[in-house]
Image (tube, helix red, strand yellow):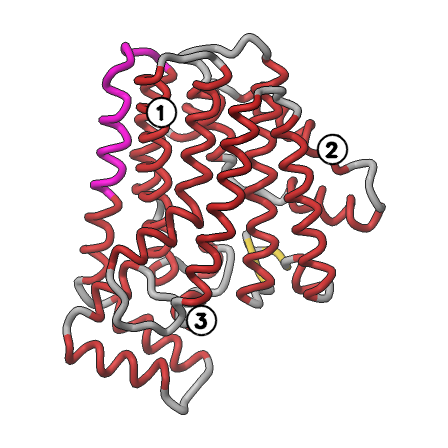
C-alpha cells in the first residue's frame, strides 16, 4: 500500500479537517485570513492528521466532531511552527512557493504564526476532553523547548548525539506523538493501547525528522521546497553533520569552512558536497530506518486491519521519500 492508498482510507475526513481549519481562520482580519488560507491550501502531505485519523480507527471516539477538531488542531499547530521556522531561518521559499516571511515583515509574520498557534489551541479545546487539552498544551511547551534547544545549540560542533535527539523530539516527534496518542484518549482505549500508539507516533516522528535532515543535503531545491543546505548554513548540527564530525580530520576541515571568513552559496555547496559524499548519510539513514521499523513493531498488539497496515506503510513511506 502506498502513502496515497493509506491516506485514501481517511480521504473524506481529511477534507473535512481542511475545511474546519479554513472555517476557523475565515472570520479574522482579511489580509491575515487570506494569507493563512493560502498556507493551508499550499500543499503538504497532511501526514500528521492522516495518522491521527487512522489511529482513531482502533478505538473510535464517541464524537466524530471531537476527532476532526483534534486532527485539525494537529495540522494547524504544524503550520504555525512552519511560519515561525521561516522567520527564525530567514527562509524565503517553502514547498516551492514564497513564504509569508518573504512578503511580510518578520514581526507581522511572527504574529501570524502566533494567531495560528491560538487557532490550534482553540481547536484542541473544542474536543471537550480535558486530557487531550492537557496533552496538547504539553506538546506546545515541548515544541517551544525544542526550538530553544536548537537555537542555543547552533555551532556547538562537539555536542553529543543525545542533544540532537532531544531537539528533534521537541521539533517534530512530540507532535506526531500527540497526533497518535490523543485519538486513543478520545476513544477510551486501555492504557497499553494508548502507550502503543504513543510509541508509534514517537518513533515515526523521529524517523521523519532524521529523513528531513538527510534531505537537506541530498534533495534538490524543488523536491525540498526550500534552499538545500539551509540547516548547516545556519550552524544547526543534524544527524548527518554529527556523523561527519566524528572523524577528527573531517571535523577540523568542516568547522574551518563553517566558521571561516568565506561565506555565501559556494561555501554552503562545498560543505554539503563533503557530507553528501561521505558515509554520514548512510549512517543517518540507517538510524531513520531503525526508528521506522520500531514504529511498525509498536503496532503488533493490534489485530491485522486495513488501518493498521496503513500506519505500518506510512512508517515505511517516511524513510522511502525520494533522496
User: What's the mark number on residue 158?
Assistant: none
Residue 256 in percent (x, y) is at 30, 85
Q: In terms of secondary structure, where does tag 2 sit?
A: helix
Earlier residue among tags 3 and 1: 1
Furthest residue in direction bottom, as rendered: 261
Region of the chain picked out in magenta, as a range? 289-306
- Please identify, in this view, whether the residue under mark 3 or under mark 1 is nearer the observer: 1
18 drawn magenta: no
Residue 37 in percent (x, y) is at 71, 42
Q: CA distance from mark 3 to mark 1?
A: 34 Å
Quarter where residue 308 is shown: top left
Residue drawn at x 56%, y 64% as measured from the top left:
88
Q: Residues within 10 Å of mark 2 (few under 14, many from 20)?
A: some
Q: Residues within 10 Å of mark 1 (few under 14, many from 20)?
A: many
Q: CA distance from mark 2 to mark 3?
A: 34 Å
The residue carrying mark 3 is 234
Whether label 3 touches label 1, CB < 8 Å: no
296 drawn magenta: yes
Q: CA distance from mark 1 to mark 2?
A: 28 Å
Q: Is residue 129 left or right of residue 102?
A: left
Whether label 1 touches label 2, CB < 8 Å: no
Q: Is residue 238 left or right of residue 125?
A: left
The residue carrying mark 1 is 197
The residue carrying mark 2 is 24
- Please identify, in this view, whether the residue under mark 1 or under mark 2 is nearer the observer: 1
Amino acid at each position: 500500500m502506498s502513502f496515497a492508498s493509506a491516506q485514501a482510507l481517511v480521504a473524506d475526513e481529511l477534507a473535512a479537517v481542511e475545511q474546519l481549519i479554513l472555517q476557523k481562520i475565515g472570520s479574522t482580519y482579511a489580509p491575515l485570513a487570506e494569507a493563512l488560507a493560502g498556507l493551508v491550501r499550499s500543499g503538504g502531505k497532511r501526514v500528521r492528521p492522516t495518522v491521527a485519523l487512522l489511529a482513531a480507527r482502533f478505538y473510535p471516539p464517541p464524537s466524530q466532531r471531537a476527532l476532526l477538531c483534534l486532527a485539525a488542531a494537529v495540522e494547524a499547530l504544524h503550520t504555525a511552527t512552519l511560519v515561525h521556522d521561516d522567520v527564525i531561518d530567514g527562509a524565503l521559499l517553502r514547498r516551492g512557493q514564497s513564504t509569508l516571511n518573504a512578503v511580510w515583515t518578520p514581526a507581522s509574520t511572527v504574529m501570524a504564526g502566533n494567531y495560528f498557534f491560538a487557532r490550534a489551541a482553540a481547536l484542541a479545546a473544542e474536543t471537550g476532553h480535558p486530557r487531550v487539552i492537557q496533552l496538547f498544551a504539553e506538546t506546545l511547551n515541548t515544541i517551544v523547548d525544542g526550538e530553544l534547544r536548537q537555537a542555543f545549540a547552533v555551532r556547538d560542533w562537539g555536542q553529543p548525539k543525545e542533544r540532537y535527539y532531544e531537539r528533534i523530539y521537541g521539533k517534530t516527534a512530540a507532535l506526531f506523538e500527540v497526533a497518535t496518542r490523543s485519538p486513543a484518549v478520545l476513544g477510551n482505549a486501555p492504557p497499553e493501547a494508548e502507550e502503543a500508539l504513543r510509541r508509534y507516533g514517537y518513533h515515526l516522528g523521529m524517523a521523519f525528522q532524521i529523513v528531513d535532515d538527510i534531505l537537506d543535503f541530498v534533495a534538490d531545491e524543488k523536491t525540498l521546497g526550500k534552499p538545500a543546505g539551509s540547516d548547516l548554513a545556519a550552524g544547526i548540527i543534524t544527524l548527518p553533520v554529527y556523523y561527519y564530525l566524528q572523524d577528527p580530520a573531517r571535523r577540523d576541515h568542516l568547522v574551518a569552512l563553517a566558521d571561516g571568513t568565506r561565506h555565501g552559496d559556494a561555501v554552503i555547496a562545498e560543505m554539503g558536497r563533503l557530507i553528501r559524499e561521505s558515509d554520514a548519510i548512510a549512517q543517518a539513514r540507517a538510524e531513520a530506518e531503525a526508528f521506522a521499523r520500531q514504529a511498525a513493531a509498536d503496532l503488533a498488539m493490534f489485530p491485522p486491519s486495513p488501518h493498521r497496515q496503513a500506519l505500518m506503510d506510512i512508517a515505511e513511506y517516511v524513510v522511502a521519500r525520494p533522496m
